[in-house]
């Protein structure tokens, strides 16, 4: 005798009754890129459908998002001035600060997580400040100014801080700084397991944040390491992270599952720019059924164990879910 699995696949009603994983609009967080100035929103060649926007357009975009049930953004800033320490993001009238305030004024219900890093703000494009002797990122000096950046975001009204620079010890430092400044209820979503991946290529076009020399392998993780990936996330949990993350998502679904099995914290998956661009281009060229492949890959991230999916597909996915 063999088991007849096809019994429970006979029609959509029974299939939906036994379906184990279901995507909803609540699963998604949408990355937005605000750029200094007053200009027509500018589409990124390597990421069709993704734009650099000025503050006014970001606010409008938030309105569109809310209409389709998309309630949270991950905010990135592209300043017009860069220097060796990223001063722009340390001042209390920074681009991100002004953007948070503008969004909250119009749409107080929009949930704003802010990416906290230095690569968009430094002239060398690294995720922290450099040790002048070694020209390598100075971990502990970067921690100090990261706290200042976090407090700026918090004071402006951010709902969540998301440090992405992969500096050791950053979660503990940010938690202390937030607590000492009266933001003990502000959650931290750590980019806890972030790999030195080639899939970030298109993002660096959008965020204008490619390193001017070298690479990020002294702070981001070796893509080959599975046990270290778990350790990285568990260490951030110990330091007080509220949400953990695996980034990128698609080539790292095994890691999402590993971490899911090792923690009870909520887990985010970042479906990064290169993953988006590859599918987008395949869709534009008619090579695959774009919408079905997109939903399948987003579902795979949730099935792997992610509770939150950060994705440039979020608007398209919500439109599809709304019309189902
Ligand atoms: C900044 C940052 C990066 C991404 C998110 N935050 C780029 C990087 O580490 O070089 C990548 C996002 C994407 O590729 O979609 N540190």
Image: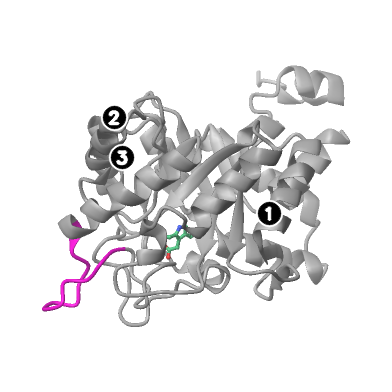
137 drawn magenta: yes
Reply above or below: 163 against 23: below
Q: Is residue 177 left or right of residue 267?
A: left
Q: Which mark is residue 38?
A: none
Rounded to the nearest whole Å, what is the CA distance between mark 1 and mark 2? Answer: 29 Å
Reply above or below: 147 against 139: above
Q: Is residue 166 left or right of residue 298?
A: left
Query: Badge 1: few (under 14), some or many (20 or more) residues near its Cα, within 10 Å?
Result: many
Q: Which mark is residue 58?
A: 1
Provide the major secondary structure of the magenta segment.
loop
CB of mark 3 near ligand 1 (< 8 Å): no
Residue drawn where x is 51% and y is 42% of the image: 113
Q: Which mark is residue 233?
A: 3
Q: Nearer the viewer, mark 1 or mark 3?
A: 1
Q: Nearer the viewer, residue 157 or 146?
A: 157
CB of mark 2 near ligand 1 (< 8 Å): no
Residue drawn where x is 37% and y is 77% of the image: 123
Q: Which residue is mark 2?
A: 179
Mark 3 and mark 2 in contact (Cβ < 8 Å)? no
* Range of magenta residues: 128-139
Q: Is residue 23 visible?
A: no
SS at circle 1? helix
Mark 3 and mark 1 in contact (Cβ < 8 Å)? no
Residue drawn where x is 80% and y is 72% of the image: 285
């Amino acid at each position: 005798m063999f088991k007849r699995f096809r019994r429970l696949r006979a029609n959509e009603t029974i299939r939906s009754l036994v379906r184990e994983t279901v995507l909803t609009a609540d699963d998604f967080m949408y990355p937005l890129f605000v750029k200094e100035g007053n200009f027509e929103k500018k589409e990124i060649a390597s990421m069709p459908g993704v734009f650099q926007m000025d503050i006014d357009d970001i606010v409008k975009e938030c309105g569109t998002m809310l209409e389709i049930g998309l309630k949270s953004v991950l905010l990135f800033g592209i300043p017009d001035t860069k220097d060796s320490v990223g001063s722009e993001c340390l001042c209390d009238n920074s681009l991100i600060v002004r953007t948070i305030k503008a969004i909250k004024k119009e749409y107080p219900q929009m949930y704003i997580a802010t990416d906290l890093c230095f690569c968009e703000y430094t002239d060398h494009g690294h995720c922290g400040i450099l040790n002048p002797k070694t020209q390598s990122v100075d971990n502990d000096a970067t921690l100090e100014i990261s706290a200042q950046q976090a407090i700026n975001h918090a004071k402006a009204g951010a709902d969540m801080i998301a440090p992405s620079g992969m500096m050791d010890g950053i979660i503990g430092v940010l938690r202390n700084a937030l607590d000492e400044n009266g933001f003990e209820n502000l959650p931290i979503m750590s980019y806890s397991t972030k790999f030195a991946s080639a899939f970030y290529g298109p993002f660096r076009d959008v965020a204008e944040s490619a390193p001017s020399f070298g690479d990020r392998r002294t702070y981001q993780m070796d893509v080959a390491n599975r046990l270290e990936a778990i350790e990285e996330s568990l260490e951030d949990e110990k330091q007080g992270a509220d949400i953990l993350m695996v980034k990128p998502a698609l080539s790292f679904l095994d890691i999402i599952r590993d971490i899911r099995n090792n923690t009870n914290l909520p887990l985010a998956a970042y479906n990064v720019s290169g993953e988006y661009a590859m599918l987008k281009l395949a869709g534009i060229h008619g090579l695959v059924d774009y919408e079905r492949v997109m939903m399948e890959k987003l579902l795979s991230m949730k099935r792997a164990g992610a509770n939150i999916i950060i994705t440039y597909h979020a608007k398209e996915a919500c439109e599809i879910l709304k019309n189902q």
